[in-house]
Every structure is written in structure tokens, then in C-alpha cells.
Image (cartoon, rainbow, N blue to C red):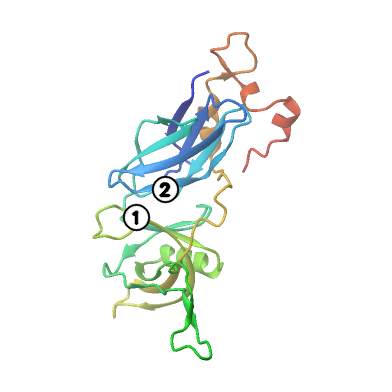
Amino acid sequence: MAVTLQATLLSAAAPRPVQLTLGGVPAGQRFEVVATTGDGVRRGVSGGVGVSTGVVVLLIDNRTPLNTPITYQALVGGVTYAAAPVTVDSAGVAVVQSLDGRDVVPVEIASLTEQRSAEPRSSTFEIAGRSDPAARLDVAGSFSYSWTFDTQGAATVALTEILRTGRPIVRRLNPGMRDLETVVIGLVRSWKDELITDGLDTWRRFSLTVREIADPQPSTALVVFVWDDFDAALSNRVWSSTDPAVRTFDEIFATWDEFDAANWAG
């Protein structure tokens, strides 16, 4: 069976998540799935690195940039397989969300200066009898960002709830906002907010200090869908067939007990 990679926009959330279906990878073969945007930025997909067990691999990507074509590629056995590009549409220019993408809030970017700082992690140690110190060399730390967002009404409530969890957040932007990174995962170290007008409206400005981090669970595949997505994703499968070209549920599960025990609600 030939290796295939398909990217499909789901309707489980807004912005819409991307479902990736990787099929035909022989059992025991390593695979890696990455996403690339038009500006050349390349990033991994959660759960996108692994060793095939011979069944179809389903992945969800809900940390994409907004309003720009995204090309997904799978590297299998030294060969790259690409899906047709997809674009995650958004009415706004930015969203802030929880790491799993279950909670998403649209925000306005209040400042494009985006102050950031980083610190070297190398150290020096004074040694008696020597004028120069011994050195311990290390890579520099990740950026600490100053982010400023404006929200109003329900968006303010939603952003406050996300921040109060104390968990990592994801900022997603349209490309072309100066040189700002379109997707950043960060841990909020502090924040403050205030009403920014003298009128009767409820616009608030949030000022966040955020330390950039890598995906804390890069090997964990995300799951998010509604039942219409489930129906669409499995509509081309049948219960059984002797034709090897026909897709069946046996490609996903070895036994019906596994099918019945699956947590379809994610």
C-alpha cells in the first residue's frame, strides 16, 4: 500500500483544527509529520513522530498560523510525502488558546513592538591562584516576551479563565505582522489588565510576561472533533471487504473489542 497523507479542516472549533491522516506506513517504519508555511517556517505536529504499527495514524493540529496556506509533509523511509495545502481561516488577526486548543479567545494585538529578552546560561567560577575564571558553557535561554492584548466583554472573561489555569498558552497570529512569530507556546509568569477607555465600554488591555517553552508533550497526539467530523473522516470505510483497495475499520483496530473500547469523545 502506498504512503498517503491527507489534511482536512474540521468543524470542531474556531479557528478550525486540521486533521491529518497518514496511511500506508509499513509496521516498524519510523515517520515524522511537519507543517511548513509560505514564509519557510517549519514546525512539528503533536504526536507526529513515531514508529508505525501498520495502522492509519490520525493527528490533530490546532496550533497553526492563521489565514495562510500550510503544507503538511510526512517523512517515511527517507521519502517525503506531501498533502494538499490547507488554510485555517480566522476573522481576526490573533487568538490566544489553551495548549490543547479546547479554550480559544480572539484578541487584538495592542502593541507590535513586542519587547523580548533572553539570558545566557553560561557561568564563571573564580579559582584561587588564577586571574581568569573557569567557565561552564551552555546555550542561551529561550525568550521572555512582553505581550499586550485588548479584549472586550466575553473575550475578557475567556482570556482571564485561560490565564487563571496557570497552564501554558499558545498565541497564534496572521503572518506579516512585522517579524512576530506566528505561533508561540509560552508559560505566563505574570499579567495585569486594566480598562483602557473613559466611556461605558468594557475594553481591557492585558499585559503579559511570557516565557517561551517547547511543546511539553510533543509525542502526545491531540484529539478534537464533533460527530459530523467523525462521520466525514470514516465515511469511506466499510465493515469488511476482500478487496485490498477498499478501506476498512480493520486498518484502525486489530479487534472489535478495541473499537468498542475506544474513547470516541477524546
Residue 142 is situated, as x and y percent measured from the top left of the image, at 43, 66
Which residue is depicted at the point 51% across and 34% down? 229
In the rendered structure, the answer to whether residue 258 lies left or right of residue 22 reads right
Name the element at disc 2.
strand
Residue 66 is situated, as x and y percent measured from the top left of the image, at 34, 49
In the rendered structure, the answer to whether residue 69 lies left or right of residue 58 reads left
Residue 146's label in the rendered image is: none
Residue bearing the label numbered 1:
182
| Residue found at the far top of this picture | 242
**Number of numbered discs overlaid on the protein picture:** 2
Q: Is residue 26 visible?
A: yes
| Residue found at the far bottom of this picture | 129
Quadrant assignment, res 58 = top right
Which residue is depicted at the point 46% across and 74% down? 122
Residue 87 is situated, as x and y percent measured from the top left of the image, at 34, 40
In the rendered view, tell whether residue 214 sits above or below residue 27.
Answer: below
User: Mark 2 belongs to which amino acid?
Assistant: Arg
Name the element at disc 1.
loop
Quadrant assignment, res 159 = bottom left
Residue 78 is situated, as x and y percent measured from the top left of the image, at 46, 31
Q: Residues within 10 Å of mark 1 (few under 14, many from 20)?
A: some
Indicate which disc, 2 or 1, sits on the residue closer to the N terminus.
2
- CA gap, disc 2 and disc 1: 11 Å
User: Mark 1 belongs to which amino acid?
Assistant: Thr
In the rendered view, tell whether residue 199 sits above or below residue 97.
Answer: below
Q: Is residue 88 visible?
A: no
Q: Residues within 10 Å of mark 2 (few under 14, many from 20)?
A: some
In the rendered structure, the answer to whether residue 27 lies left or right of residue 7 reads right
Residue bearing the label numbered 2:
43
| Residue found at the far front of this picture | 129
Seen from the viewer's position, the closer of residues 55 and 239 is 55
In the rendered view, tell whether residue 199 sits above or below residue 216.
Answer: below
